[in-house]
Amino acid sequence: MEASLQFRTTAPAARVRPAVSFRTPINLTPKRFGFSRAGAFMSNPKRISLSCSPIRAQQPDLKEESATLPESNISEADALKIKEWEVQRLQDEVAANQGIMIRRRPPTGPPLHYVGPFQFRLQNEGNTPRNILEEIVWNKDKEVSEMKERRHLGTLRTALAEAPPARDFVGALKASYSRTGLPGLIAEVKKASPSRGILREDFDPVDIAKAYEKGGAACLSVLTDEKYFKGSFENLEAIRNAGVTCPLLCKEFIIDAWQIYYARTKGADAVLLIAAVLPDLDIKYMVKICKLLGMTALVEVHDEREMDRVLGIDGIQLVGINNRDLGTFKVDISNTKKLLQGERGEKIREKGIIVVGESGLFTPADIAYVQEAGCRAVLVGESIVKQQDPTKGISELFGKDISC
């Protein structure tokens, strides 16, 4: 594993090439250099030569002209800012073409000295989040940048080598389904949420995790976002070190492949990838990283377009259907049935994908509904974490004791 592992957070950049040309070569030595929506950077930067050949964006709806930056009017630092800004704009174009409405960061105007094809519409777009998910993503973008500055990807090599072996997340769900005849439970260790506030005041992540395992959970989901969900990577690590044998999902808002490596060092066996946030190229790349690390990717969708995108990506074993509307945060479990009908359901069965029902599951009738729709697993947090005894809460959720 050590020999084949390549420490990169950059998805292949061939499809995203910034529309910038220079009259003469300029040598830059950047500390950070963005190429992909995955928050790319070069952990071992080399001198980069930007030749005078035009580098154009391969997007059919963009204008053909490129920016011209006279050497006498621009510094190396300004040239780098312009290049990064244009790459960000291209990332937004790619995401918009795939129906992704969640913007990675607040829109900003072009840097000083910029002359190019982009028509910036800040006054129309606004610089406030459109919904809570976008607010979380904007905050996460800043947070991850700071974390990467403190701990570069190269320094994770030792921690990865010392991390406990990854466990079979998908295998645990299949085994649970075979044993109980009911959807395998991914029980969520969650203290709070933006929509519900604090869910449990006497919150001890290790005690809750052990109660879930005792109650028959196949896997656990551990919130690691601190600002909005009161979670932490320390909680994830503590649960893993406490001897809990259930495979662990790092429930984080992944925008950068660095986060996957970091989650693995903390004992995660799986991560969440949200199709509403990540373009197809990033999902493909991150799924490959997960496989290299022995991890599982749970790819989450909310609507038909996201489901169609995900079904067009090879190598995905686990798809979660979130029944929560991203704009209103209202929950409707019939969304699961809608997304699994007809050709989509057939394709899922052909590919052998396990579907996970998410959000709005509180009763045995809810579990039966999503199981009949085609779910072989469910991810549940609020309805069991709020119970005085989470072990008993699992029995009440399924209408029977599903423990071993």
Image (spheres, helix red, strand yellow):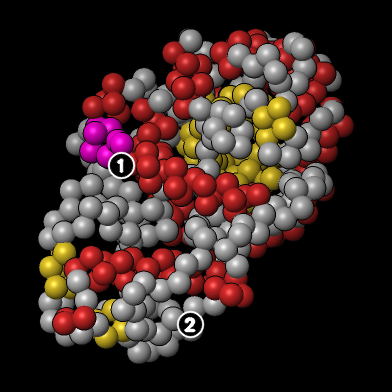
Tell whether 55 sits left or right of 179.
left
* Secondary structure found at label 1: helix
Q: Main secondary structure of the magenta part?
A: helix
- The boundaries of the magenta stretch are 150-157
Name the mark on residue 119: 2
The quarter of the image holding the C terminus is top right
Q: Earlier in the sequence, mark 1 or mark 2?
A: 2
For the image shown, how many numbered marks are present on the structure?
A: 2
For the residue pair 236 and 138, the one nearer the viewer reads as 138
Residue 228 visible, this orientation: yes
Task: Tell me how far mark 1 sits from mark 2, CA to CA.
Answer: 32 Å
Classed neighbour count for the residue bearing mark 2: other residues with Cα under 10 Å, few (<14), some (14–19), many (≥20): few
* Secondary structure found at label 2: loop
| Pointer 1 residue | 149
Q: Where's residue 15, x and y in %?
A: 36, 70
Q: Which quarter of the figure has residue 308? A: bottom right
Residue at x 16% of width, y 59% of height: 29
Tell whether 397 sits left or right of 260.
right
In the image, residue 58 lies in the stretch drawn in magenta = no
In the image, residue 152 lies in the stretch drawn in magenta = yes
The quarter of the image holding the N terminus is top left
For the residue pair 63 and 182, the one nearer the viewer reads as 63
